[in-house]
């Protein structure tokens, strides 16, 4: 057993292993207040909630309070390991400023009330609007952080009960492009890859994915391969020098917003050198000729000029990818939050189809998720799609769903694609949406162009319901605030990016009168009087297990088939990968084995979209293109980013994450170790740009775009010249000093600066390119910025003290632990 400062060493110690071997176990644990395992009353099974990795863990409970966590050695995902946010983030659950009573707005102020008053206010307003304006007045905006059971219930209420099409999740900001890219290539959502692919891959390519910071345990698996015999080669595509870039064999640092050009050049090289599997292409795909044509002119030289990456480096990367025997790829926000998001992500799928690298060990694609339960938002239809990957433009699928729900097919809106959040905001602005029910997301910090968002959400004619665990920036704008129970205080299941389903059990009671999201949603459905076509209650369950059983039936025969799973089966051991059914009782490690897809016209989830306009492809067109359900190779031409640099705004601004915080910090800002590691916003700039302006480390800068400003101390880092990076975690609500609101709202949140614009196919907003200016407000006087030194924000100048956590951040590691 060793004790490690897991703030200073986020990935812990190495347990090297070689290709094809099993990743050794290492059980990580942290107990607060110097407690030892002997002090713990009970351990309750769960999985991690502050990222998408889905690491199995047990929650330690003492005197009916959560006091710590321990990784589960038996879990296939993490083999016992936990990351810093997992080890320390749970402390937010015990925060004294949790919401404990419902709040309603009276004479402009939010005041405490009882549940009946609050829920009647919500249901009555919704009923009034339904009568006056119909379902199009009502919208739901949810998250990637609830449980499967909650999403399924929410989707049923919205689609089957109220009949509105205005349903979306913050997954739109997050992994809409993952789903869209999979639907374009495979005509269906669902990840081809498995985490075990890391164990045997000889090349691992990460596209716009800072895995080291955002999926720390998965990166630990990569680090352990890198430390072992016959390590894989790593390709990193990222304009910053992230820890991934530092570990890479080849680091391509393109200009932000030029991914499609770079990918087209890589594909050009694969085709030109014959590094493709012609038999596989012939037997299992359509669209090769068009792809070849589209990329014919995209030589490394052409791409080098656009992306500002040396042509030689592009060739080197292409050679590694082209000659890999077992290629694993992952893709995330550097590709997804861009103006050609889906087009770029699809290129990664193309590479795997071209090389026939699918459905076998070491050959996975992970079109990554970010949030812990984002996969379920999509599967259950809480992002506006229909449950279990049913196709909203296939009438037979609608009829089938109507049967499962016992409603009239015409009740389920399918006249047009679901209304994505950016369009919902437009409808609120125009006044046609009058009621918005927000669950577990904080749009007043996380959506682009915050000044506009605040204006929209605080309109009088909008009735805003916010269901949260804290009085977030968004909750402060609400008409009704509903206090929710969270992870550890409620039971449910969730599915990570490699299709592994985990059960998370209730460990303790929620604070005060807080209730689980599921209970609140069911209460709402009953107060709305929602019924099926025989007059029985529409929502037929009253607890999580009932909802799960309902979902299983809905998933039967669909790609994400859960019928072989049960709460009992998920207890005690590892999480299990879907599809899990009679045919695959122990789950399924690899899908798309032997070139078999779910892309048949009658079965598939989507007929795809036009890559330029985003217009849905008609069924007849799809049938003509892909009658037998092969993988579809899709090509797109590079288009320059929409907001270009100018004399006035000479920098490209990108935004993203740091290892120590989660999103708008409502949880990690309340965990002392994490908050101390990254206490305030900073801005990253390259050494040459800083030198040109005589800036030194720690100078206070003002970053502006036409939409707003942020003040931040500069960290001179390994970011490419011409680019600035801001972490987006810092809203205007201060959690560090006892949750007092700051006086001024502007000036910290990266999204004051971002623009209202999105990818035409996935509708994912663009958070990673905007044109910005900087000026110095005041000099550092020897004080460096407080940005972490262990991460992408590592300083390239001297004199910055390293980020450490001290004694309070010591966690235990037990290598080979069997618990
Ligand atoms: N610590 C931590 N972990 C998290 C989260 C968190 O908040 N904190 N959130 C979770 C969630 S919801 C998500 S979605 C994931 C996100 O995980 P990531 O996508 O890994 O995180 P980001 O920092 O948003 O973006 C990744 C990288 O994209 C790069 N990038 C920016 N512009 C471009 C571009 O034009 N091209 C390329 N190739 N790269 C570019 C940035 O430099 C950045 O390093 O993380 C999950 N895990
Ligand atoms: N500039 C910029 N903006 C971005 C991004 C970026 O890279 N750059 N990334 C985008 C991405 S990928 C994402 S995922 C979003 C994230 O953006 P948000 O979803 O807005 O961020 P969170 O802070 O995770 O908000 C979750 C809210 O749910 C509450 N909550 C937590 N658990 C529960 C629960 O069990 N029940 C209920 N009812 N509430 C709960 C939390 O207190 C918090 O207020 O941000 C997006 N915005
Ligand atoms: Mo996300």
Image (cartoon, rainbow, N blue to C red):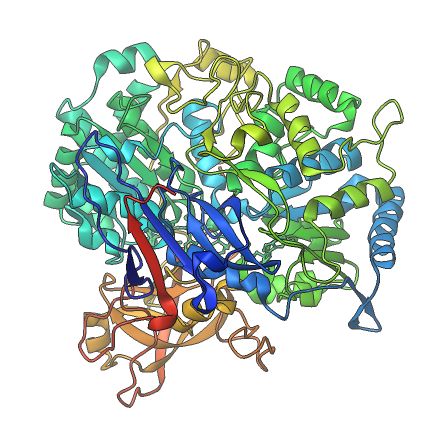
Q: In x, y percent, where is residue 733? A: 57, 72
User: Farthest residue in the front direction?
Assistant: 38
618 lies above or below 694: above
User: Farthest residue in the bottom direction?
Assistant: 781
Observer-nearest of 488 and 776: 488
The quadrant holding residue 207 is top left
496 lies above or below 103: above
Tell me if residue 599 can be seen: yes
Tell me if residue 664 can be seen: no
Q: In x, y percent, where is residue 639? A: 36, 43
Residue ID at (75%, 37%): 157
Observer-nearest of 555 and 634: 555
Which quadrant, please, contains the N terminus? bottom left
The quadrant holding residue 17 is top left
In the rendered structure, the answer to whether residue 583 lies left or right of residue 472 reads: left
In the rendered structure, the answer to whether residue 319 lies left or right of residue 362 reads: left
Residue ID at (35%, 23%): 633
Q: In x, y percent, where is residue 366? A: 37, 35
């Amino acid at each position: 057993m060793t004790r490690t400062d897991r703030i200073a060493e986020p990935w812990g110690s190495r347990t090297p292993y070689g290709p094809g071997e099993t990743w050794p176990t290492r059980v990580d644990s942290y107990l607060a207040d110097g407690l030892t395992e002997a002090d713990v009353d009970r351990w309750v099974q769960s999985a991690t909630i502050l990222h998408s990795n889905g690491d199995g863990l047990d929650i330690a409970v003492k005197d009916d309070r959560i006091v710590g966590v321990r990784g589960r050695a038996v879990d296939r995902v993490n083999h016992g390991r936990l990351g810093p946010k997992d080890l320390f983030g749970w402390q937010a659950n015990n925060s004294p400023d949790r919401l404990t009573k419902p709040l309603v707005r009276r004479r402009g102020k939010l005041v405490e009330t009882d549940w009946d008053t609050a829920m009647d206010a919500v249901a009555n307003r919704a009923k009034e609007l339904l009568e006056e304006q119909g379902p199009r007045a009502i919208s739901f905006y949810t998250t990637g952080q609830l449980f499967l059971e909650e999403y399924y219930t929410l989707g049923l209420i919205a689609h089957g009960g109220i009949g509105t099409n205005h349903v979306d999740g913050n997954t739109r900001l997050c992994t809409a492009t993952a789903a869209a890219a999979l639907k374009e290539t495979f005509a269906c959502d669902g990840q081809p890859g498995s985490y075990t692919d890391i164990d045997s891959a000889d090349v691992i390519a990460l596209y716009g994915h800072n895995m080291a910071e955002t999926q720390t345990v998965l990166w630990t698996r990569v680090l352990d391969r890198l430390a072992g015999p016959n390590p894989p080669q790593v390709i990193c595509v990222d304009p910053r020098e992230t820890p991934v870039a530092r570990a890479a064999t080849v680091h391509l640092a393109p200009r932000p917003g030029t991914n499609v050009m770079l990918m087209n050049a890589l594909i050009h090289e694969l085709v030109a050198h014959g590094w493709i599997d012609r038999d596989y292409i012939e037997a299992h795909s359509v669209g090769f000729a068009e792809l070849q044509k589209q990329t014919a002119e995209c030589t490394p030289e052409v791409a080098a000029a656009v992306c500002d990456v040396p042509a030689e480096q592009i060739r080197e990367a292409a050679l590694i990818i082209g000659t890999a025997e077992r290629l694993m790829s992952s893709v995330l926000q550097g590709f997804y939050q861009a103006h050609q998001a889906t087009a770029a992500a699809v290129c990664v799928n193309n590479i795997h189809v071209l090389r026939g690298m699918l459905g076998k060990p070491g050959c996975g694609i992970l079109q990554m998720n970010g949030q812990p339960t984002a996969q379920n938002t999509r599967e259950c239809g809480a992002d506006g799609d229909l449950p279990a990957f049913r196709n909203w433009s296939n009438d037979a699928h609608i009829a089938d769903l109507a049967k499962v729900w016992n409603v009239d097919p015409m009740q389920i809106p399918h006249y047009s694609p679901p209304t994505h959040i950016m369009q919902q905001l437009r409808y609120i602005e125009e006044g046609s949406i009058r009621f918005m029910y927000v669950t577990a997301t904080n749009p007043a910090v996380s959506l682009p162009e915050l000044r506009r968002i605040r204006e929209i959400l605080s309109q009088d004619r909008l009735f805003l319901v916010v269901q949260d665990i804290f009085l977030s920036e968004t909750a402060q704008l609400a008409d009704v605030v509903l206090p929710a129970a969270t992870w550890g205080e409620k039971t449910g299941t969730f599915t990570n990016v490699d299709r592994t389903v985990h059960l998370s059990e209730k460990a303790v009671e929620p604070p005060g009168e807080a209730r689980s999201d599921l209970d609140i949603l069911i209460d709402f459905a009953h107060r709305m009087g929602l019924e099926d076509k025989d007059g029985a209650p529409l929502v037929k369950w009253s607890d999580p297990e009932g909802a799960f059983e309902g979902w299983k039936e809905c998933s039967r025969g669909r790609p994400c088939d859960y019928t072989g799973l049960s709460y009992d089966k998920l207890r005690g051991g590892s999480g299990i990968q879907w599809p899990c059914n009679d045919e695959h009782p122990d789950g399924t490690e690899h899908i798309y084995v032997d070139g078999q897809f779910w892309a048949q016209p009658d079965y598939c989830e989507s007929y795809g979209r036009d890559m330029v306009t985003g217009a849905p492809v008609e069924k007849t067109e799809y049938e003509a293109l892909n009658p037998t359900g092969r993988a579809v190779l899709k090509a797109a031409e590079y288009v320059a980013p929409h907001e270009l640099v100018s004399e006035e705004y000479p920098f490209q601004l990108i935004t993203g994450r740091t290892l120590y915080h989660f999103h708008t910090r409502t949880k990690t800002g309340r965990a002392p170790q994490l908050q101390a590691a990254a206490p305030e916003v900073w801005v990253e700039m390259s050494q040459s740009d800083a030198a040109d302006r005589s800036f030194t480390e720690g100078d206070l800068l003002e970053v502006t775009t036409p939409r707003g400003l942020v003040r931040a101390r500069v960290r001179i880092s390994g970011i490419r010249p011409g680019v600035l990076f801001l972490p987006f975690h810092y809203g205007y609500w201060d959690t560090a000093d006892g949750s007092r609101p700051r006086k001024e709202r502007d000036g910290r949140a990266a999204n004051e600066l971002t623009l209202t614009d999105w990818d035409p196919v996935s509708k994912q907003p663009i958070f990673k390119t905007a044109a910005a200016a900087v000026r110095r407000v005041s000099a550092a006087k020897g004080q460096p910025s407080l940005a972490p030194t262990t991460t992408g924000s590592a300083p390239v100048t001297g004199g910055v003290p390293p980020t450490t956590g001290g004694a309070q951040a010591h966690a235990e590691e037990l290598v080979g632990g069997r618990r």
